[in-house]
Image (cartoon, rainbow, N blue to C red):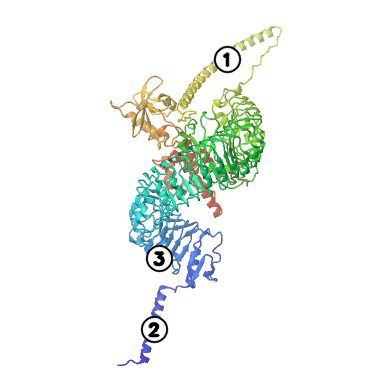
Amino acid sequence: MESNPVQLFHHLALALLLFVFSVSVSVTEQGPVPSIRTDAAALLSFKKIIQNDPNRVLSGWQINRSPCNWYGVSCTLGRVTHLDLSGSSLAGIISFDPLSSLDMLSALNLSSNPFTVNSTSLLHLPYALQQLQLSSTGLEGPVPEKFFSKNPNLVYINLSHNNLSSLPDDLLLNSDKVQALDLSYNNFTGSISGLRVENSCNSLSQLDLSGNFLIDSIPPSLSNCTNLKTLNLSFNMITGEIPGSLGELGSFQRLDLSHNHISGWIPSELGNACNSLLELKLSYNNISGSIPVSFSPCSWLQTLDLSNNNISGPFPDSILQNLGSLERLLLSYNLISGLFPASVSYCKSLKVLDLSSNRFYGTIPPDICPGAASLEELRLPDNLLEGEIPAQLSQCSKLKRLDVSINFLNGSIPAELGNLENLEQLIAWYNGLEGKIPPELGKCKNLKDLILNNNNLSGIIPVELFSCSNLEWISLTSNQFTGKIPREFGLLSRLAVLQLANNSLSGEIPTELGNCSSLVWLDLNSNKLTGEIPPRLGRQLGAKALSGILSGNTLVFVRNVGNSCKGVGGLLEFAGIKAERLLQVPTLKTCDFTRLYSGAVLSLFTQYQTLEYLDLSYNELRGKIPDETGEMMALQVLELAHNQLSGEIPASLGQLKNLGVFDASHNRLQGQIPDSFSNLSFLVQIDLSNNELTGEIPQRGQLSTLPASQYANNPGLCGVPLNPCGSGNSHAASNPVPDGGRGGRKSSATSWANSIVLGILISIASLCILVVWAIAMRVRHKEAEEVKMLNSLQASHAATTWKIDKEKEPLSINVATFQRQLRKLKFSQLIEATNGFSAASLIGCGGFGEVFKATLKDGSSVAIKKLIRLSCQGDREFMAEMETLGKIKHRNLVPLLGYCKIGTPGYVPPEYYQSFRCTAKGDVYSFGVVLLELLTGKRPTDKEDFGDTNLVGWVKMKVREGKQMEVIDPEFLSVTKGTDEAEAEEVKEMVRYLEISLQCVDDFPSKRPSMLQVVAMLRELMPGSANGSSNSG
């Protein structure tokens, strides 16, 4: 039966109508059809949850305008496909729910905005999203387990610099399309070894988990990500060995495992990736063994960084012959030995060669260039190199930095180095270099640093050097230079550091040094300089600061603590040098270089408004100390000792609020110590001994708290800490007027009786005074003996820096508990009895402390146990423990005879209870506790607040939990109400104070800053950075 065409048409029309009707019903049930209007509605909903828009970037998001013209919005075919609001300073507690209906959105970038975002919101992103950039957006919480299954189209993800807390083990499952995943610098903790990596990561080419707190070993299964090109796990706490399976990655280009705790050898299998490997960074780990020869075929390798490990053995010279693409070879801080690798000349692309702090020996090859013609930095300090500096280095035409410090080089400085037009740094301190400074160096117009101290150089300072107008640091200390200090130094407007100490320079200090508008560090000590001190030296108030001075230097100030070396110390270029190396150098280890200062306090000193360091000691200077010295507002060190200075100490020096060290001893100074010195609150060391000073030492401020030795041999000086000044009062004599007759005799008799009574009273009073005086003198003599004993101990044990001014009376404990009267011992008595807790007195060591054999003054032999359980104890806990011990009686147990409690609970650093060695870093810890007291409003030890821990432990626990704002005293935050910007700035400042405090109370003394660094950090937080430390430019 044939079908009717008309009927067929009707059937088709009816079917089409039914289909359209069903679609319209379906759409009606599911919501409006996605369009540009629904996109606009979604964006406006997102705008509503933005609480702060300081730059008004969203002000143009209006319903009467097309969303395609809104700020940050891009469209394709009339639909929103890209949203980029990065760096707009938007703020608020947001979620991504409003954006979930943007079904055509493929790229979302909200990075660098101070939002607060819960990580669960990551499950509500638009389904079609391919690129997600949320770095620095306040994203917090764990990464959701179904993150990739809910967002299957993601290709590029950047969630770095947030507060994400944990990673699911199946993170990389269902991540078939992901090519780049950046989760760096979050708060991820836990093991990385459990990360499940299967064949679902075949598209992954970049994985970055750096800057977290991940532990355990790297999972070998990462090699299942067969297209992985970049793996960055740096700055974590990863242990174990490097999996050799990573060498199986055929496209592997970059591996960064630096700053972890990785151990073991470098697997030779990594050489299997040589066909593609571009960067290998393994620095700052515990890697040992030798460098594998399997790296020889890595012809594409550009960076090889193995620095700061324990790599040993000879360097395989052959591997460099094929590394024609190598640009950076960094091997510093290892134990690598052998001859200097001559094959460096094959590395035609090499820019930086750093072999610092190793055991390379032999000579520097003369033929490094022109083979390594691209070489810009040759860093060789702290090795065993000998011979001469090759003149052929002048063929390295691009060379900017040449550092050969602390080696055994000899001979003269090649004049050919003057041909290096790009040379910026010539650093060769502590070698055996001889001869003169070649005048040809004056042709190095870009020269910034000329650091040649501690050599055997001689002759005069060549005037040709002053053609190098960019010079910033000149150090010629400890050589044999003669002649006068050239006046041409005044031409160097960028000169910040001038060190000419310990030479044989003569003549007067040139006044032209006052023209050095950037000079903040001047050390001329131990020369033969004569004449008077110029009134103006170095940078003056109001001078315009030049930018970038010493910006590329690693500055370390080595403080000379003892008297074995002259001067306060010295400023060194310390890049690539281990601190302990100073104690191994024969002629340097005679100086007590136990204190090294670096960091912020030195990096900022070039911005100071005046001279910061001035050492003119050990010369033949005469005349007065200029009054203008008091105008050097940033001055911290003023050394004028061992000269022939006379006159009075200028009262203007009391204006130097930052002065920490002032030494004018061994001069001919007269008059009184100015009372203005009482205002010097940062003064920690003053020496005015061996002068002709008179009068009373100012009793306000710091001066009376310093040792008497620093005022000695000034016959007319008195007052604490010296002998008291005499009163100078005398009793007036009474002359009775004679009176004739009886009345006169009666008056005489009465007067005589009164005199007898007065005499008796005076005698009794005098006797009482004598008794009191005798008792006081006995106590003072006893204290003096203790101080003398402590000083003698300190002198005999240089590593120990005891400082016990006035000891507390030991705690009172219920003596009825014990069999006999419990002896209350002072800490000084224990120090004397154990010879400073010396190793020779140590007779035992256990889990609760060390036991020392001691002989007390009464001849009794006792065992003294240093408890190490005191770090969290208060007075109550200590007394309870002593009473408990006293109740325990057994024939095999020795009785408890006495006790001593030192320090103030809560303020004492943990290491004191183990070593009893008082150190400067211990003082930093105590200062940090005081800062925490101020920030939190809590006492250091309070059982109600902290339970079994103390203030420091409680704060650290809160910070680990990400609750640092809970430790700040609400009183601080309540006074910051104002604009959002002001409140945010105040909170930021409080957090910065907290960070400084936590640095001070670090468990490891070596990680704590010095007090100078603490002062510098605190000054940075002061409004305007006043007191001369701000930049005047």
Name the N-terminal-most of marks 3 and 1. Answer: 3
Disc 3 from disc 2: Cα separation: 34 Å
Q: Which mark is residue 761?
A: 1
User: Marks 1 and 2, Cα distance to the nearest angstrom?
Assistant: 133 Å
x then y, percent, for residue 763: 57, 13
Label ID, residue 16: 2
Examine the rendered structure and indicate whether residue 109 appears above or below residue 946.
below
Residue, x 53% and y 19% (percent of image)? 773
Disc 1 crowd rating (10 Å Cα; few below 14, some 14-19, many 20+) is few
Q: Check disc 2 and give the amino acid type.
A: Leu
State yes or no: discs 3 and 2 in contact (Cβ < 8 Å). no
Tag 1 secondary structure: helix
Mark 3 or mark 2: whose residue is earlier in sequence: 2
Amino acid marked by disc 1: Leu
> Is residue 633 rendered to the left or right of residue 787?
right
Judged from the image, the secondary structure of the residue bearing numbered disc 3 is loop
Up the image or down, 32 lies above or below 262; here it is: below
Nearest to the observer: residue 583 or residue 647: 583
Q: Which residue was labeled with disc 3?
A: 153
Q: Nearer the viewer, residue 484 or 878?
A: 484
Q: Nearer the viewer, mark 3 or mark 1?
A: 3
Q: Nearer the viewer, mark 3 or mark 2?
A: 3
Counting from the top left corner in percent of width and height, residue 494 is at 61, 44
Residue type, mark 3 in image: Asn
The location of residue 796, given as percent across then percent down, is 45, 26
Alpha-carbon neighbours of circle 2 within 10 Å: few (<14), some, or many (≥20)? few
**Residue at position x 39%, y 83% from top?**
16
Q: Nearer the viewer, mark 1 or mark 2?
A: 2
Around disc 3, counting alpha carbons within 10 Å, would you say few (fewer than 14), some (14 to 19), or many (20 or more)? Answer: some
Instruction: Choose top left, top right, bottom left or bottom right for residue 835.
Output: top left
Cβ atoms at labels 3 and 1 below 8 Å apart: no
